[in-house]
Image (tube, rainbow, N blue to C red):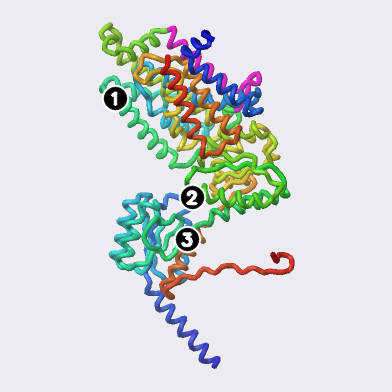
Amino acid sequence: MRKLVFTLLVALFMLGAAFGAKYVVGLSLSTLNNPFFVTLRDGAIDTAEKLGIELIVLDAQDNPAKQLNDIEDLIQRGVDLIIINPTDSDAIVSAVESANEAGIPVITVDRASNGGKVVCHIASDNVEGGRMAARYIAKVLNGKGKVVELVGILGTSAARDRGKGFEEEIAKYPGLQLVAKQTANFNRAEGLIVMENILEAHPDIDAVFAQNDEMALGAIEAIKATGKLDEIVVVGFDAIPDAIEAIKKGEMEATIAQQPYLMGQLAVTKAFEYLTTGTVFFPVELKLITQENVE
Amino acid sequence: MKGIWNLMRRYPVVVGFIALLVVLSILSDRFLTISNLLNVLRQVSVQAIIAFGMTIVIISGGIDLSVGSVFAFSAVVLASILKQGSILLAVLAGLGVGALFGLFNGFVIAKAKLQPFIVTLATMAIARSFTLLYTNGMPITGFSDAFRFIGRGEIFSIPVPVFIMFGVFFLTWYLLSQTKLGLYAYSIGGNEEATRLSGVNVDNYKIIFYTLSGVYSAISAMILIARLNSAQPIFGEGYELDAIAAVVLGGASLSGGKGTVLGTLFGALIMGIINNGLNLLNVSPFYQQAVKGSIILAAVLLEREK
């Protein structure tokens, strides 16, 4: 019996390896001019190597028209699956539809497609990122204090999701007050001006959450001018080089980093899973219920 | 009562400004403090200086859409040289960039007889491209305290940018009201052909007007970099519209021949105070654009009543 199981396992593994070697997957990236996407590509390449997938990487140079051509080329080559990191969520729809018509499955990464059929979409959870920032601020302030939120460009999904997560989580701490919420359009110069004004209205704030690092860095300059940098906790989002520098200098307390390498890894892993099993499985965490947390 | 009405008809922008002051003082106890008013002046200085240059151009019957992009290019050039160390050289280079672009605008508009709107729209795009190419899209950050004094320093507890703003204001006022250059600006804006026929070298004056506009952009770029400790390739986007709005609020006519730098100063102050007030009152960001637009519209309507 045990022997049989062992033989079966070996056979399955060999089958998988044999299949794996045959898969050709296309990866169409929005740009390789940005370290974020280069890291994403590296994650994808390393994983493809491990799984024995042949990966064809194409760079759209932030040009939606070039990306459409790239994907049409991949369809012509008859690849088994295409992973797309769209330059633009609307402009990519026709490319996704072309792949659908050719019967080639599509997985999107970082930006979604606003149409066509995709197997799954892999992206950072911005809502969770907002929650993380709120939890960090709550921890540092011991759940008590006045908080300011700097909002990004109104109507963008990043601004919406990061704000949603942050505000929902802040609301859970009765001692934390959101005293001001103003937009600075993801822009450093506006972050400075808006923060100067907020400091005039609320000189006694304890923490600032900026929905991206640019606004956080502008806010830091405004806070510095009032000499209160040691008293105010500043949290950003994105982990851009200037922000990492500011954290090292102790001017900024924290930033929420996305994990592009992991994104690339996950995209290829899910592609392999779909090609071998015809479906993708996302486990949901289980929760332990005891007398302490039973509702 | 009649006196107030006359005042309103003559200087609607000043009346609007005072009305805003009163309303905001009632709504927010934080508004009418010395510290906040200095804060507003410091913030307004960047927009106001660009608007002073725009005033000269608009009075002469032109328009300069390139101010925001020229602002950005001059900022990144200044910042990159600043990183090498020499403040004087950096400032001169920054001002030089502004002057060169202004000179180019003026030269093409005057000599090729093209519409200022189109020419400056083109240089707006070109200067933005130069900025992105020059920086590779990355910000340039971290300057010496000596340079940052321009943006953060205070003299007699008045912020340095406010001094610079009033310096440029008085220079512009002097040029427009006490010199030939000002006289010809109004007359070219009023009737270009008649001015040309009376023997004035219209082309040369036009080149000077646009050059001044470029230099003013560069001066204000210097203030913003010093305040922010960073020069960003996306600097100045939309600044041309803010500047035009300030000039029009100040009573200038987009068809030329009319306008004052004092009006523009109040126009810029109104824009700055609206922003500051909305932040102080924590007005929902979703409403802010509408509030701003309505106030501008109301002020321009008052202007029409004259």
Residue B168's spot in the image, x, y percent?
Answer: 50, 17
The answer to whether A83 is drawn above or below residue B98 in the figure is: below
Query: Which disc is residue B115 wearing?
Result: 1
Between marks 1 and 2 in the image, the one whose residue lies nearer the viewer = 2
Question: The residue tagged with tag 2: helix, strand or loop?
Answer: helix
Residue highlighted by disc 3: A122
The answer to whether mark 3 and mark 2 are in CB contact below 8 A is no
Same subunit under labels 1 and 2? no
Residue A157's spot in the image, x, y percent?
Answer: 48, 50
Query: Is residue B174 magenta-colored?
Result: yes
Query: Which residue sits at x=48%, y=37%?
Result: B232
Q: Quadrant of residue A73?
A: bottom left
Report the span colored magenta: B152-178
Q: For the residues marked 3 and 2, what is the alpha-carbon distance in whole angstroms?
A: 15 Å
Within 10 Å of the Cα at label 3, are there few (<14), some (14-19), or many (20+) other Cα atoms?
some
Most distant residue in the front direction: B1
Residue highlighted by disc 2: A157
